Image (cartoon, rainbow, N blue to C red):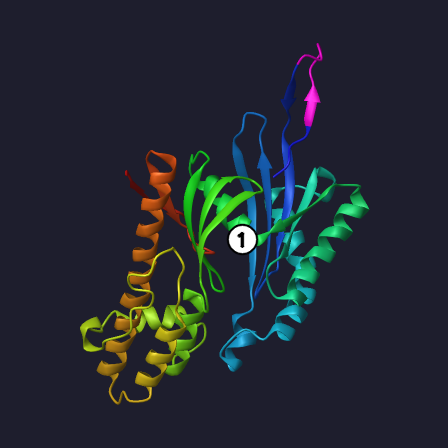
């Protein structure tokens, strides 16, 4: 987020004033708009957050279809943004700037949100802030808690899986990333192999509640390998092959539970490795924050 600086009466120092921004997110299959206010004293207030889901449009295909997603963004973004402004009790004239996802993501969806943001900014003579949506995930942890820089972050979203050393806005160092598929991708594809409805992740989690993870043995990728990278492709393939052999509801539940344990174990093991390395590098306590795309951050602290 950028800040507007005003000179005080003496011109000897700068002070910040309140800033109100409209944020737009269209990187995948949800059209989202939020109005956020950064107060002069540093407090951040989320005035509204409106999300339009496309689940019904993609469900028949068992996954996100980029062309359908882009068209849905075109059809809904104006109404979603207007609702965000109404919910905040503001008009476009009250904004100090517009922020929009500029990538990474599905290019068609990104273009829709960025073009709409440019139009609002141009019409109102406002600055436009192009946001890397992964960095948005990283620094958004600070909206919900008092988290000083620097911090170590585990970022897990539908298409991404990374470990980041976050030094500040525009200063994220990647310590590890998936070398093939993301955890969210594995959840959805394995769920589809089990015949579960879209979105697959929540359906697989529900099925796993009645299962025994010891019922199946799944590969442990990168076990003992140096570094902080992830790999879920082998797990996805092994689970998909096993899904072809299950014949009972109990077996399906057991496989779902085994998949959940395998994915969680790898996330935990690689994060523990990153935490130890980060602590050694900084010589002090660190915090790793799990930041799924639509979940509040969860803290886990360790000392070297």
Q: Quadrant of the N terminus?
A: top right
The quarter of the picture where residue 207 lies is bottom left
Choose between 219 and 105: the one closer to the eye.
219
Q: Which residues are magenta?
A: 5-12
Residue 139 percent across, percent down from the top left: 50, 43
Q: Residue at x 46, y 35 (%)?
A: 149
Choose between 58 and 241: the one closer to the eye.
241
Residue 136 percent across, percent down from the top left: 54, 48
Q: Is residue 281 visible?
A: yes
Residue 249 shown in magenta: no
Q: Residue at x 41, y 73 (%)?
A: 233
Is 148 rendered above or below residue 223?
A: above
**Residue identified by numbered label 1:** 134
Q: Horizontal placement of 9 versus 196: left or right?
A: right
Residue 8 shown in magenta: yes
Residue 61 percent across, percent down from the top left: 53, 81
Among all residues in the image, which is located at the extreme top? Answer: 10
Q: Horizontal placement of 240 versus 120: left or right?
A: left
Q: Residue at x 68, y 12 (%)?
A: 12
Residue 273 percent across, percent down from the top left: 32, 51
Label 1: which secondary element:
helix
Q: Horizontal placement of 253 versus 82: left or right?
A: left
Q: Quadrant of the C terminus?
A: top left
Q: Is residue 95 visible?
A: no
Is 41 rendered above or below residue 253?
A: above
């Amino acid at each position: 987020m950028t800040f507007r600086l005003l000179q005080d009466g003496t011109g000897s120092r700068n002070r910040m004033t309140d800033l109100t921004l409209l944020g737009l997110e269209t990187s995948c299959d949800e059209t989202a708009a939020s109005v956020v206010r950064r107060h002069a004293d540093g407090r951040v207030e989320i005035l509204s957050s409106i999300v339009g889901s496309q689940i019904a449009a993609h469900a028949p295909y068992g996954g996100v279809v980029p062309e359908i997603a882009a068209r849905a963004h075109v059809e809904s973004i104006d109404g979603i943004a207007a609702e965000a402004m109404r919910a905040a009790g503001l008009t476009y004239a009250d904004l100090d700037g517009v922020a929009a996802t500029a990538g990474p993501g599905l290019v068609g969806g990104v273009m829709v949100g960025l073009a709409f943001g440019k139009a609002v900014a141009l019409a109102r003579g406002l600055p436009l802030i192009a946001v890397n949506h992964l960095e948005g995930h990283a620094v958004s942890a600070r909206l919900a808690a008092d988290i000083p820089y620097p911090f170590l972050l585990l970022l897990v979203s539908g298409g991404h899986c990374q470990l980041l050393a976050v030094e500040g806005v525009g200063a994220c160092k990647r310590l590890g990333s998936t070398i093939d598929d993301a955890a969210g991708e594995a959840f959805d594809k394995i769920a589809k192999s089990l015949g579960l409805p879209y979105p697959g992740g929540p359906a697989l989690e529900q099925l796993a509640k009645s299962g025994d993870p010891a019922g199946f043995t799944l590969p442990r990728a990168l076990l003992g390998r140096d570094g902080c990278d992830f790999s879920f492709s082998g797990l996805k393939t092994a689970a998909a092959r096993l899904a072809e052999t299950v014949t009972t509801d109990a077996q399906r539940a057991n496989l779902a539970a085994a998949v959940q344990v395998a994915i969680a174990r790898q996330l935990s093991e690689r994060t523990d490795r990153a935490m130890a390395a980060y602590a050694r590098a900084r010589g002090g306590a660190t915090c790793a924050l799990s930041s799924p795309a639509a979940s509040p951050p969860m803290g886990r602290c360790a000392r070297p």
